[in-house]
């Protein structure tokens, strides 16, 4: 059976999805990509209700094209005072160097999972595509999303996860290769050894499922898009290549590092959130090791790092920042998101 192509089920002109990138974008990037014929994405895991409603209203007022809203489906672990204390103790030399009193740091999860309240806000705007990371929401919430006609897609990092997503109601699957920047979408098993690169994972997922498959990870140019489509992808999801676009909110520190040779060295790390994510190697990753068991479980590690990041970035340093990026930063350019989208999609 021939799989439906993703542009057909989402209504986009081009087989290009802009990856949702919390912390380095808002609705402006999503609008620009959607207006250019791709599928712009708004990440909402770090948005409060007021900001989410405002961002969705902005998208609806500035484009009539399809767009995607992305949510996390993780389970937030309860506070663990002992682990938090050990984490702050490990970070204490850095607090001392910047004159930060760790007793003033407010603990918090930083990222919220999809909830009934979030669904209610989204229903006001009825985004045509909703994507999920870390699996899918509970059946009642998934049914709510589908009730307004949304196409549901979610990330899989293994064939087993892809089969699970298909069986539990996903309309499309994002095959996230190990090269991808930002957080891994794994939810059935956290063993990195079970995960593989995009162009090894993609054809296996395509062969295993009946729904459209989106390739993600390491794709930054038209050649990569063509290769993914040739391997059976219905579309590609691209994030890293958009980081230098003027519509992104990527910090000046992050932008400068993306333009440097340092951007060629990325690693998987749990230091910045507690979840495994790929970013450019910096001082904290070198000194503590990129994967450190002391980091509290996702997403509780980020609270203690927030003041260190702010203090370092004020000195134009990315030593304590999550410099999310995929393994291939070669095509990062400061060009308009619309031009990049058309280029990726073969429209230019």
Image: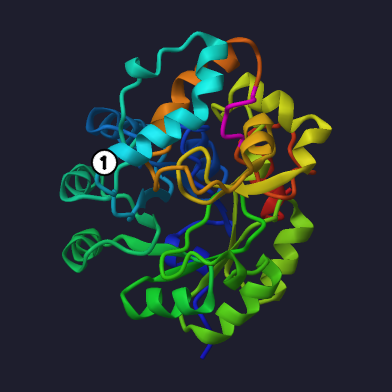
Asked whether the viewer can see residue 297, the reply is yes
Rendering quarter of residue 285: top right
Task: Give the extent of the magenta segment.
Answer: 318-323
Asked whether the viewer can see residue 334, the reply is no
| Foreground of the two, 48 or 343 | 48
Q: Give the residue displayed 39% in from the left and 73% down from the top.
A: 165
- Across and down, in percent, residue 201 comes to 63, 73
Residue on which the image places disc 1: 79
Main SS of residues in magenta: loop
- Across and down, in percent, residue 139 comes to 20, 68
- Across and down, in percent, residue 158 comes to 53, 73
Q: Give the residue displayed 45% in from the left and 45% down from the top.
A: 274
Q: Give the residue displayed 50% in from the left and 33% down from the top.
A: 25
Rendering quarter of residue 204: bottom right
Determine the secondary structure under disc 1: loop
- Number of labelled discs? 1
């Amino acid at each position: 059976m021939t799989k439906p192509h993703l542009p057909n089920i989402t209504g986009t002109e081009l087989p290009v999805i802009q990856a949702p990138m919390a912390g380095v974008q808002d609705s402006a990037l999503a609008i620009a990509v959607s207006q250019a014929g791709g599928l712009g994405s708004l990440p909402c895991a770090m948005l409060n209700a007021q900001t989410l409603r405002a961002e969705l209203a902005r998208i609806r007022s500035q484009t009539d094209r399809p767009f995607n809203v992305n949510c996390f489906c993780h389970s937030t672990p309860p506070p663990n005072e002992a682990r938090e204390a050990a984490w702050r103790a490990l970070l204490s030399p850095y607090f001392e160097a910047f004159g930060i009193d760790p007793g003033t740091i407010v603990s918090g999860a930083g990222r919220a999972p999809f909830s009934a309240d979030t669904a209610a806000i989204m229903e006001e705007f009825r985004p045509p595509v909703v994507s999920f990371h870390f699996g899918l929401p509970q059946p009642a919430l998934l049914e709510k999303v589908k009730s307004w006609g949304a196409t549901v897609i979610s990330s899989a990092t293994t064939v087993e996860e892809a089969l699970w997503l298909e069986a539990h109601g996903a309309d499309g699957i994002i095959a996230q290769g190990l090269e991808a920047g930002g957080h891994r979408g794994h939810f059935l098993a956290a063993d990195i050894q079970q995960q593989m690169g995009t162009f090894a994972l993609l054809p296996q997922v395509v062969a295993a499922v009946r729904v459209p498959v989106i390739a993600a990870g390491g794709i930054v140019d038209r050649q990569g898009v063509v290769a993914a489509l040739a391997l059976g992808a219905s579309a590609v999801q691209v994030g890293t290549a958009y980081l230098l676009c003027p519509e992104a909110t990527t910090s000046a520190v992050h932008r400068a590092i993306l333009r440097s040779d340092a951007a060629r060295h990325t690693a998987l790390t749990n230091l910045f959130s507690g979840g495994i994510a790929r970013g450019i190697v910096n001082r904290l990753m070198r000194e503590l090791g990129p994967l450190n068991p002391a980091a509290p479980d996702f997403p509780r590690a980020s609270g203690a790092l927030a003041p260190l990041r702010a203090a370092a970035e004020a000195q134009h340093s990315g030593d304590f920042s999550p410099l999310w990026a995929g393994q291939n930063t070669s095509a990062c350019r400061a060009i308009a998101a619309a031009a990049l989208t058309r280029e990726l999609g073969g429209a230019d």
